[in-house]
């Protein structure tokens, strides 16, 4: 009896341990999901801060979700109107179409809008970084002159602000207000550098803070940082000038040569088709030879679609390559993409029209 009682107690103890382990795993899983959601929200919030947008991540998600709902409602209303005017579609077909719209189309719209959102935010972050780096050297030189004139570092930063500095002047005004309200200058400067995805700005602020903490000559330090930034900018411009030949060649090949070759190929296809139709082969002349003199299997419309798609892809990647060579960053090529695509496709249709008139006159 004692042995059975001991076994029952031991079994109950093992069950309680298993339940504790199960509950611990469940809590760990819930905690992991919460941390993943929090990490995603923090990442979106960090992106918005770098882009200078004051909206919260929850509000952005709500706006994108509402846009998807509106687009799906508009598409559903259009489909229901089309189905109601054509009685060939039954209830099952309409229900299946609505299910497809509200599951797959909705998810596709959601992913597309988030992708567009991240592209726009990334471009905004890039523009803010470029705007800061263009005027940073001049601002540091003015600050260096103010420090050498006997001003403290916070006043030197404040009096170095000029209207032409744009967003940098506004950020320095925020730093000055924070220091006047009692915040530490180092913390205010670090908060300022964290708002921008700029390695140049972060390195300059870190050197300035280290110089303040070390008690060195801040005026000379700021001047050296400004000179180093200017030399780096000049070096980038020299490198871009040295590879101008490659930029000209890529631009010529994608904008002028490719449309001309595609237009010429299209006209040659039409000429070959017309010649094949006009050739009269006598009966029995081509016995034993597998030759077909019928029209080409590629129509002019199919070739035109193929040419436009090829020109679109070629212009897109050419614009990115040109931007990388000239600016050193792929993001700078987004402003070239519409121009390259529009010019290449427009020239293709112009060349096709001119060559069509030329070959039509000959034939």
Image (spheres, rainbow, N blue to C red):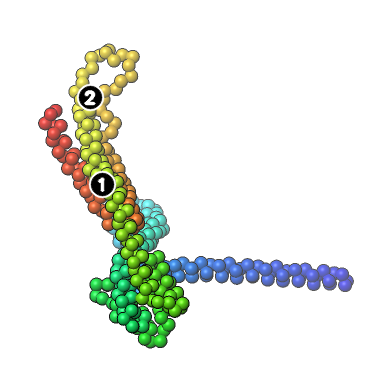
Left or right: where 173 falls relative to 6: left
The percent position of residue 5, horizontal first and vertical second, equals 84, 72
Does the rendering let one see residue 122? yes
Q: Residue at x 34, y 56 (%)?
A: 328
Relative depth, front residue between 147 and 42: 147
Quarter of the image for the N terminus: give it: bottom right
Q: Residue at x 29, y 80 (%)?
A: 159
Relative depth, front residue between 330 and 40: 330
Q: How many marks?
A: 2
The percent position of residue 131, horizontal first and vertical second, equals 30, 67
Q: Which callout, 1 or 2, points at the residue further toward the start of the chain?
A: 1
Viewer-side label of 1, 2? 1
Label of residue 276 in the image: 2
Residue reaching furthest to the bottom: 181
Label of residue 248 in the image: 1
Q: Is residue 353 above or below residue 236?
A: above
Q: Is residue 247 above or below residue 357?
A: below
Q: Residue at x 67, y 68 (%)?
A: 21
Relative depth, front residue between 295 and 234: 234
Q: Quadrant of residue 29?
A: bottom right
Disc 2 on helix, strand or loop? helix
């Amino acid at each position: 009896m004692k042995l059975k009682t001991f076994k029952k107690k031991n079994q109950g103890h093992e069950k309680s341990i298993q339940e504790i382990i199960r509950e611990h795993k469940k809590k760990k899983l819930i905690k992991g999901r919460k941390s993943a959601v929090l990490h995603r929200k923090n990442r979106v919030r960090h992106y918005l801060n770098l882009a200078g947008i004051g909206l919260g991540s929850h509000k952005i998600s709500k706006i994108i979700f509402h846009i998807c709902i509106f687009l799906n409602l508009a598409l559903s209303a259009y489909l229901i109107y089309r189905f109601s005017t054509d009685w060939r579609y039954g209830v099952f077909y309409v229900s299946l179409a609505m299910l497809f719209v509200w599951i797959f189309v909705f998810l596709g719209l959601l992913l597309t809008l988030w992708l567009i959102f991240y592209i726009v935010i990334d471009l905004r972050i890039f523009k803010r970084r470029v705007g800061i780096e263009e005027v940073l050297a001049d601002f540091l030189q003015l600050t260096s002159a103010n420090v050498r004139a006997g001003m403290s570092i916070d006043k030197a930063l404040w009096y170095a602000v000029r209207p032409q500095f744009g967003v940098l002047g506004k950020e320095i005004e925020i730093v000055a207000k924070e220091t006047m309200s009692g915040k530490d200058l180092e913390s205010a400067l670090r908060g300022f550098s964290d708002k921008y995805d700029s390695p140049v700005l972060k390195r300059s602020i870190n050197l300035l803070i280290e110089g303040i903490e070390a008690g060195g000559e801040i005026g000379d330090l700021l001047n050296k940082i400004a000179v180093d930034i200017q030399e780096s900018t000049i070096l980038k411009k020299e490198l871009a000038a040295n590879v101008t030949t490659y930029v000209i060649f890529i631009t010529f090949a994608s904008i002028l040569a490719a449309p001309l070759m595609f237009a010429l190929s299209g006209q040659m296809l039409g000429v070959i088709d017309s010649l094949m139709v006009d050739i009269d082969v006598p009966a029995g002349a081509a016995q034993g030879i597998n030759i077909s003199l019928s029209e080409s299997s590629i129509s002019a419309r199919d070739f035109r679609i193929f040419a436009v798609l090829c020109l679109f892809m070629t212009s897109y990647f050419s614009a990115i390559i040109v931007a990388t060579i000239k600016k050193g960053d792929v993001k700078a090529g987004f402003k070239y993409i519409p121009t390259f695509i529009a010019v290449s496709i427009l020239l293709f249709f112009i060349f096709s029209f001119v060559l069509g008139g030329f070959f039509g006159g000959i034939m």
